Structures are given as structure tokens and as C-alpha cells.
Image: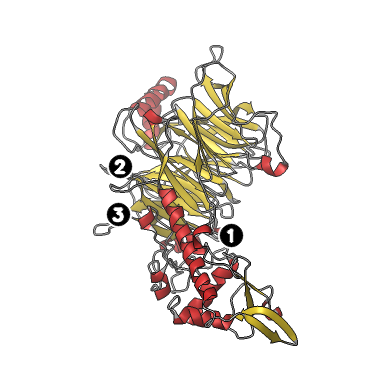
């Protein structure tokens, strides 16, 4: 797995500086520390820096985050903070994707490439898009030509042309850097910040340098009819954009309305200049929910829109033409179906109600099914078709996955088909990411939906390096998308962004490997459980060896501590029995036993309130009640963690 630092450092970071960071992110990426003897004996307990250690649990069907040591060019690692978090990640196609941050005014474009001789693809910086005055809250792709929308904290939306196949170092030519990237700026789109955007219709986009296609032919014909054939020749000579339109929906995340917008082309006069809008936006309609809307997604070409609110309700909207309005008018949307797994009369505490919110939505198999993710970490798969009665409410999902994630679902994305069968026998896939740092990929046989449980075939834990350290900030997933690679073989690569500013390129999404048995998530949890049991067995062995680690009454500063042992004895035992390669490793291992597993506790005043095991003869500890005078409990100790699928 490849990992790079995005360089979204905050509003004070100028474009040139962010570009330099982006171009130098790969210099010191492969510096990793050599595993110690303790790491060979069991899974690593050291994890002081989540940016330098490698953790690979491929034997349980997972790939764990491998953050390279990202350098600033002088060999020193960059200092990451919460302002580096990426708020939005969007795939453009052809191996390109965009990233943006709420604390940065610059949008960055990246390219995934596989160089000759390299076994793994890498991430290369392409260009910056500068123009917003405040942090960027969300991004959304418009069409296959590379247009995209961006929304910022000042309630402004901009329409861009990413120019997928053009590099910044191109000189001259029809598509040089001098050509515009910013197509239009729309001010005061809402009274609140824009939280999400969904493209309902990609419309048309005709550039003078595009290849002749149906859209260009229609735009040129209309222009010739309205203005004459000379206007077409003049537009080509002045390199005018002769068509730019689309339709989209926006939500604020703090209001119960979904606003529909229509973008139409503005005819140009003369050569286009910087800051000149080629399109204008108009409000078309408002769609109302009973609660605050927190997620929205649309399926282009199908006139279908899904919205999810804070109370766990999902509504399906469909559009149709109005015979009383011109054909060029925006579509009229109406709610045709509601999906809710709970009844309106169900009572819940405020804390419970907060977990109902639908945070992410994704369609599956066209518009026949969709997946919803909530703040509670639950995933539900629904069938779109009901009784085909307008206004009906569907109360039962076809699949409910609970317990797979322990944090709020941040994103759900549809994956590729895992089989080349027809629609009825195909195997669908989707990936979900959450605040707990996990990315899970599930496979669902279409023919057995509702009759069998979906299988998890890939587990990625970005926070595995910090799993035993309570004083370390956990790493969560802030954005997720599936990237389609160019070429004859259309590989789909999952790209994630974390709250520490890293962009992670995960393994290609595909069917489970031959010989792989069982669910990957279950095997992953079994491995974590075995590791915890190993820790418990080590502490149990220390407790039994009364000669090496003696528990007795000890005096310190005129006070008697009953039945305690010293930290120095524990450290010496771990080193002598080769559980740790050094006394420093032994201190880290003992720290895990204290902070995470609660196998013994501190009793002396000199170390009360601290979280580390001290290599000191005056630091006293006492075994927890589970250990005091009890036989082996290793088989009964494992934590109860389960995933239920209904």
C-alpha cells in the first residue's frame, strides 16, 4: 500500500508552498525501522510513531496502514496536526483524483501511476486549483470530461475544469496552462455552509479543443441557428466555450431542506478572460425532510436522488418533466418512497437519537439497491423497489450489518462486480470507512440477497499502530473513494484519506484469493484476540513466577504497601525471558499491560496518575483482581467482540 502526505496545512499555507510539499512527499517515504525480537515473537507492541512503523497482517486477509516517513526535503519528518485532515476526496477517472481540506483554500489534484519496473502503483502530484478564500468543505465530480464543483465555508461554489490529460509543464499548444481552469463562481448559495453536493444531471460541456462528438455538433448547430455560421467560426477562433450546463443538489448539514440548482451556459463575447463566468446558476426547487439532512447522493441518467436525515430516515426522490414548462426548464422532483428501520413512536434518549443519523449513502447495481451507513456504525442494504406506491414507507432492510464498525460511518462506496455473470447471478461489492480507522469490503451475491449473509473479504485498519496506546491520538478515516485505473484492465483501487493528512492507496478491489476460507473480518478479530491472549499469558506467567517477580509487603516513605511488586522486577523478567529485546521494549510492553489490558495497577504515590511502567525499584504495582490467587484464565479472558448480520 502506498501512502503520501497531502500537504493541506491550513489557510496560511500559500499555493507555492503547498506545491513544494506535494512534490517532495515521496523523498523519505520508505524509511522504516527494523523489527525487534519482541516483534518477531508476537505482533508489534511498539508504535510510538504511527508514521514510521509498518504493520502487515496479510495472513488474516487484511492490509494495515503503512505510513511512510514523510519528509520535508531535509530529512526531518513533517509535523502533522488536526488541520491536515482531508475533508473530501473525489475520483475523476483515468487514475486522477482530488483532495481538499476545510482548513486549506487549495484543491489538489493527484494521479495514480505505475512506472515500468515498479510492482506497486504510486501517487504523483499534478496541480493545484487556487481561488477559494476560505476552507473547502466538499467536492463533487460533474462529468467524464473532468469538470467538478467545490464548496467553501463562505457559502461559495465554484465550477472547475480539471483538464485531466494536461500537465503543468506543457508549453504552448491548444491546451496550455494559460487556458482557464475556473469556469464559474456562484456566490451566496445558502445561508449556511455547504455540507454536500450531488450531481443529478451532468448536462453538456463543449470546449473548442474537444473532439467532434454529439454534444459539440448540437451546440454548434444551435449557435449557428441563433447567431449564424460566422458566430461559430468566431467562437472557434477566440477559443470560446460554447456549452456548459448541469444540475445538482446541495445540503447544509444543519437544515431539513435539499436545494436543487440548475446551471446554464452564458454566451461569451470575445476571448474569455480570467474571472469571467461561462455559466450561471438558478435555484430550481427545495425538497423537505422532517429532520436535518446529513447525506445526499444522485444517480446520473436515472433521475433518482437519495437523501438521509439525522433521524435515520432515507427518502427516494424521482424527477419528471412538466408539460406546462419549456423543455429547457429544470426537472421537478417528488418523493416516491421512504425507508426507515424504526417506527416514529419509538422513544430514544438524546444520545441514542444522535446515532440514528444517516452519514453516507451509495447505490448498488444501478438503481435497484442502495447502502446506508449511520453514526452508530451500522450498515443497511435496501431494495429500492417497493410496492410501487407513491409515498409508501419501507420498514425492513434486506441486510443489516451491525458491529462491523465501532465508529461512525464516514463513507460508503460501490465497488466493482466480483464476477462476470449476468445481473441475476452477479456478485456485488462495496467498501465502507469509519472513524475507527477501518475500511471494510463486503461481497453480496445478488441471487442470494436476503437468504445469506454478506462476506467481508478485505479488512484495512489504519489505526492498528496505536491500538494499545491510550495516550496516542487515534487515526480515523475522513474520506473514501474507489479509483478506476486507465488501461485495458480496469483496476479499481480504494483511496482513503485520514485525519492526519495522509492519502493511502489500498490494494485493488477484487474477489477473495483462492484458498481463503472464512470471513476476513472474523479472522482479523481472531488474530487480535490471540494477540491479547498472548499478552495475558505473559502477565500470567510473570504472576506465577514468584521467585522472579515477588509480591510481598514493601515499605516506602514511612508507608507499607501490601502484596506488591516492583516495576524493575517486571522489566528484568521480560528481558531475561526474551519477551522484549531491551529494557526500553520491556517498558513499552509493560505499558500496554497497564493502559490497555488493565492486568496490574500502580499503588505507590510516586507513580500514581502516570500511565507508563517505570523501570524503578521504588515503583510499586499490584496484580488486578483477575490475577490475584487464581489459576490460568487465558481461555476465558478474551474480550467479547462480535459482528451480527441480520
Residue occupying the point 72% across, 42% down:
350
Q: Earlier in the sequence, mark 2 or mark 3?
A: 3
The residue labelled by disc 2 is 490
> Mark on residue 228?
none
**336 to 359, vertically: above or below:** above
Task: Name which residue lies at 70% across and 38% down.
Answer: 348
Q: Which residue is mark 1?
A: 82
Q: Residue at x 34, y 32 (%)?
A: 426
Work out whether residue 226 or residue 288 is closer to the camera in this orientation and state it.
288
Neighbourhood count class around disc 1 (C-alpha, 10 Å): few under 14, some 14–19, many 20 upward: few
Name which residue lies at 45% across and 82% down: 576
Side of 360 where 224 appears, left or right: left
Label 2 neighbourhood size at 10 Å, few (<14), some (14-19), many (20+)?
Answer: few
- Characterize the local packing of mark 3: few (<14), some (14-19) or many (20 or more) Cα atoms within 10 angstroms: few
Q: Secondary structure at mark 1?
A: helix
Marks 1 and 3, how far apart at CA: 31 Å
Depth check, front residue: 24 or 378: 378
Q: Is 63 drawn above or below residue 409 in the view shown?
A: below
CA separation, marks 2 and 1? 35 Å
- Residue 73, quarter of the rendered image: bottom left
Residue 128 visible? The answer is no
Q: Pointer 2 and pointer 3: residues touching (CB < 8 Å)?
A: no
Judge whether 311 appears above or below 593 on screen.
Answer: above
Secondary structure beneath disc 2? Answer: loop
Residue that label 3 marks: 114
Amino acid at each position: 500500500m502506498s501512502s503520501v502526505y497531502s500537504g493541506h496545512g491550513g489557510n496560511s499555507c500559500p499555493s507555492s508552498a503547498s506545491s513544494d510539499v506535494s512534490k517532495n512527499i515521496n523523498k523519505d517515504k520508505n524509511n522504516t525501522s527494523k523489527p525487534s525480537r519482541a516483534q518477531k515473537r508476537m505482533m508489534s507492541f511498539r508504535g510510538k510513531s504511527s508514521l514510521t512503523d509498518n504493520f502487515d497482517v496479510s495472513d488474516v486477509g487484511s492490509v494495515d496502514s503503512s505510513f511512510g516517513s514523510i519528509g520535508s526535503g531535509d530529512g526531518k519528518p513533517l509535523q502533522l496536526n488536526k488541520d491536515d485532515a482531508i475533508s473530501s476526496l473525489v475520483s475523476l477517472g483515468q487514475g486522477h483524483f482530488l483532495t481538499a481540506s476545510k482548513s486549506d483554500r487549495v484543491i489538489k489534484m493527484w494521479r495514480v501511476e505505475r512506472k515500468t519496473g515498479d510492482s506497486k502503483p504510486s501517487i504523483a502530484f499534478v496541480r493545484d486549483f487556487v481561488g477559494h478564500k476560505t476552507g473547502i468543505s466538499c467536492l463533487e465530480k460533474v462529468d467524464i470530461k473532468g469538470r467538478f464543483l467545490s464548496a467553501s465555508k463562505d457559502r461559495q461554489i465554484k465550477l472547475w475544469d480539471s483538464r485531466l490529460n494536461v500537465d503543468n509543464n506543457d508549453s504552448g499548444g491548444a491546451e496550455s496552462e494559460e487556458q482557464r481552469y475556473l469556469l464559474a463562481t456562484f456566490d451566496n448559495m445558502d445561508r449556511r455552509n455547504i455540507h454536500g453536493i450531488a450531481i443529478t444531471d451532468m448536462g453538456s460541456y463543449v470546449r473548442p479543443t474537444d473532439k467532434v462528438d454529439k454534444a459539440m455538433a448540437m451546440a454548434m448547430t444551435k449557435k449557428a441557428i441563433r447567431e449564424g455560421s460566422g458566430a461559430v467560426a468566431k467562437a472557434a477562433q477566440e477559443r470560446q466555450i460554447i456549452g456548459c450546463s448541469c444540475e445538482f443538489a446541495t445540503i447544509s448539514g444543519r437544515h431539513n431542506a435539499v436545494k436543487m440548482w440548475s446551471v446554464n451556459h452564458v454566451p461569451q463575447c470575445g476571448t474569455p478572460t480570467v474571472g469571467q463566468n461561462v455559466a450561471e446558476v438558478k435555484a430550481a426547487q427545495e425538497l423537505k425532510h422532517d429532520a436535518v439532512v446529513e447525506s445526499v447522493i444522485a444517480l446520473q441518467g436515472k433521475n433518482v436522488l437519495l437523501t438521509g436525515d439525522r433521524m435515520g430516515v432515507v427518502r427516494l426522490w424521482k424527477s419528471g418533466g412538466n408539460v406546462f414548462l419549456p423543455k429547457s426548464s429544470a426537472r421537478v422532483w417528488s418523493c416516491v418512497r421512504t425507508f426507515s428501520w424504526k417506527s416514529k413512536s419509538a422513544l430514544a434518549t438524546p444520545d441514542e437519537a444522535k446515532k440514528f443519523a444517516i452519514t453516507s449513502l451509495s447505490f448498488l447495481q444501478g438503481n435497484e439497491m442502495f447502502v446506508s451507513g449511520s453514526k452508530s456504525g451500522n450498515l443497511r442494504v435496501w431494495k429500492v423497489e417497493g410496492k410501487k406506491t407513491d409515498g409508501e414507507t419501507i420498514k425492513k432492510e434486506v441486510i443489516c450489518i451491525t458491529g462491523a464498525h465501532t465508529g461512525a460511518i464516514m463513507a460508503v462506496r460501490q465497488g466493482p462486480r466480483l464476477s462476470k455473470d449476468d445481473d441475476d447471478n452477479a456478485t456485488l461489492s462495496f467498501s465502507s470507512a469509519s472513524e475507527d480507522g477501518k475500511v471494510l469490503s463486503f461481497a453480496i451475491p445478488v441471487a442470494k440477497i436476503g437468504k445469506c449473509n454478506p462476506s467481508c473479504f478485505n479488512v484495512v485498519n489504519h489505526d492498528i499502530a496505536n491500538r494499545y496506546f491510550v495516550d496516542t491520538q487515534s487515526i480515523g478515516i475522513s474520506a473514501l473513494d474507489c479509483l478506476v485505473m486507465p488501461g485495458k484492465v480496469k483496476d479499481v483501487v480504494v483511496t482513503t484519506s485520514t485525519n492526519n493528512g495522509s492519502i493511502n492507496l489500498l490494494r485493488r478491489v477484487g474477489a477473495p484469493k483462492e484458498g481463503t476460507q472464512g470471513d476476513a473480518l472474523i479472522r482479523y478479530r481472531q488474530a487480535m484476540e490471540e494477540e491479547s491472549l498472548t499478552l495475558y499469558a505473559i502477565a500470567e506467567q510473570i504472576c506465577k513466577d514468584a521467585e522472579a517477580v515477588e509480591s510481598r509487603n514493601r515499605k516506602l516513605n514511612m508507608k507499607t504497601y501490601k502484596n506488591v511488586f516492583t516495576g524493575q522486577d517486571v522489566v528484568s523478567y521480560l528481558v531475561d525471558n526474551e519477551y522484549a529485546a531491551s529494557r526500553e521494549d520491556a517498558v513499552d510492553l509493560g505499558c500496554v499491560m497497564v493502559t490497555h489490558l488493565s492486568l496490574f495497577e500502580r499503588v505507590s504515590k510516586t507513580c500514581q496518575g502516570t500511565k507508563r511502567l517505570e523501570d524503578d525499584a521504588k515503583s510499586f504495582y499490584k496484580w488486578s483482581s483477575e490475577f490475584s490467587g487464581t489459576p490460568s484464565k487465558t481461555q476465558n479472558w478474551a474480550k467479547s467482540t462480535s459482528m451480527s448480520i441480520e
